[in-house]
Amino acid sequence: MDVLVLGAGIIGLTTAYFLNKEGFEVTVVDRNNDVALETSFANGAQLSYSYVAPLAGPGVMSHVPKWLLDKNSPLRFRPSLDPATLCWNVRFMKACTATQSNHTTRELLTLSFLSRDLYHTMMQQENIAFDHKRAGKLIVHRSRDSFDHAVEQLDFQRSLGCEQRALSVEECLSLEPSLQRMRDHLSGGIYTESEESGDCYQLAVALKKILQQRGVTFRFNTPIKKLVTDSTRKVSVQTDNAERLSADHIVVALGCDSTALLKPLGIAVPVSPLKGYSLTLPIQSATDAPVVSITDYERKVVYARLGERLRVAGMADMVGLDRHIDTARIETLKQEARNLFPDAGNYDLATLWAGLRPATPKGKPIIDGTRYGNLWLNIGQGALGFTLASGSARVMTDLIRGQPLPLERNVFTLADA
């Protein structure tokens, strides 16, 4: 049987990988001239299997007034009267409860742990080099209240299989000496030894090479104009040059662009873009750059070491499908990084990036079929796309095959997004 995978980001590529392993004839379609040139290109680089708490949490709404007034806030919103955006915002607000957040965290952990196991198997079998490192992750908290709340959550996290421990200020600095400049602004940290990091783009390029060697076809420079249905309720793909692409199965893995593509078919997916930014700089002083992956909790900025480079990523701008690099936001990100790691490298030589994270209100991906027999969805992984990609792809593959899922049940449906 043949499958069209729409999208050559990390979600589409891992989906193609597992489908190919199961004997499907796979074609990957993308508008760009190569793989992973958008959201997967320069993300936060953290494989955060244990820390998957959704953005919609019990304390978020109390911060919104402050964020709206601060041009440098980690989250920024552009007021909109668009019905889809308003609906997404309402559903997001409803999800900002402790009960819903804990429920979503529990569900996401089942997928992230599956993804971790599958990535490890993939790395053993394929010998892929992508600056992968298991250096652990340290979430640093500036305020005492924030740190105390994180400590209270440790028992809940442990009950779900996460091995984490709270560190004092001195323990944080002992673990990661490069944080010394933060000493006077640090209340403590939560350390997860098993967390990992890697270059998502390098992994994507390696997967493309493997898939090409195994017979997978790539159709680059092929923008998708629309999805078309026939009398049998099967879907085909019409490209910008009026070419019609058909297959036994079609998997939509187009992130934020999925919403507009699916709407004419009567499929409303609550996926909205949250634009993030990153900069990647060559490390010039190894002792001044962090080895452990760092998340600055209050600033919503992450730091990950990729070989001899430092990736700094953060921000979440709800500004629609605006992909341009906002220089003011980049300067804010640079300043945050300079404040912590001023001597790590030359920030003026950093490579800059902005990408759209495809987010659902609850923070859960949509891995599901549709009322069209050959149309499938693998979208909405948000900021966890890199982390959840292999697990999402495995679930998608088993759904298409009609085989028992690697999870107890599929809780990542469109109806529950």
Image: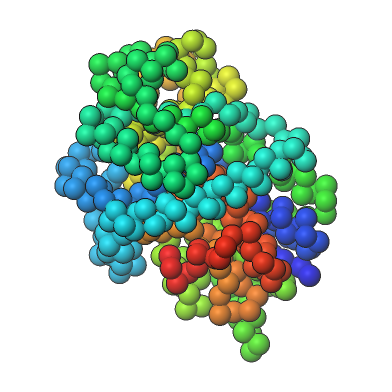
Q: Is residue 92 left or right of residue 22?
A: left
Q: Is residue 69 left or right of residue 261?
A: left
Nearer to me, 323 or 217: 217
Nearer to me, 252 or 354: 252
Visible residue check, residue 337:
yes
Identify the residue shown where x is 41% and y is 56%: 104
Q: Is residue 362 left or right of residue 248?
A: left
Nearer to me, 93 or 109: 109
Identify the residue shown where x is 52% and y is 59%: 379
Quadrant (top left, top right, bottom left, bottom right) of the C terminus: bottom left
Identify the residue shown where x is 28% and y is 45%: 76
Model colouring: rainbow
Which percent across, then down, holds residue 173? 38, 15
In the rendered image, which quarter is residue 186 located in?
A: top left
Q: Is residue 328 left or right of residue 410?
A: left
* Looking at the image, residue 322 lies above or below residue 407: above
* Looking at the image, residue 202 lies above or below residue 169: below
Quadrant (top left, top right, bottom left, bottom right) of the N terminus: bottom right
Which percent across, then down, holds residue 156? 38, 45
Identify the residue shown where x is 34% and y is 58%: 100
In the rendered image, which quarter is residue 240 located in?
A: bottom right
Which percent across, then down, holds residue 220? 68, 53
Visible residue check, residue 346:
no
How many marks on residues? 0
Which percent across, then down, holds residue 82? 30, 66
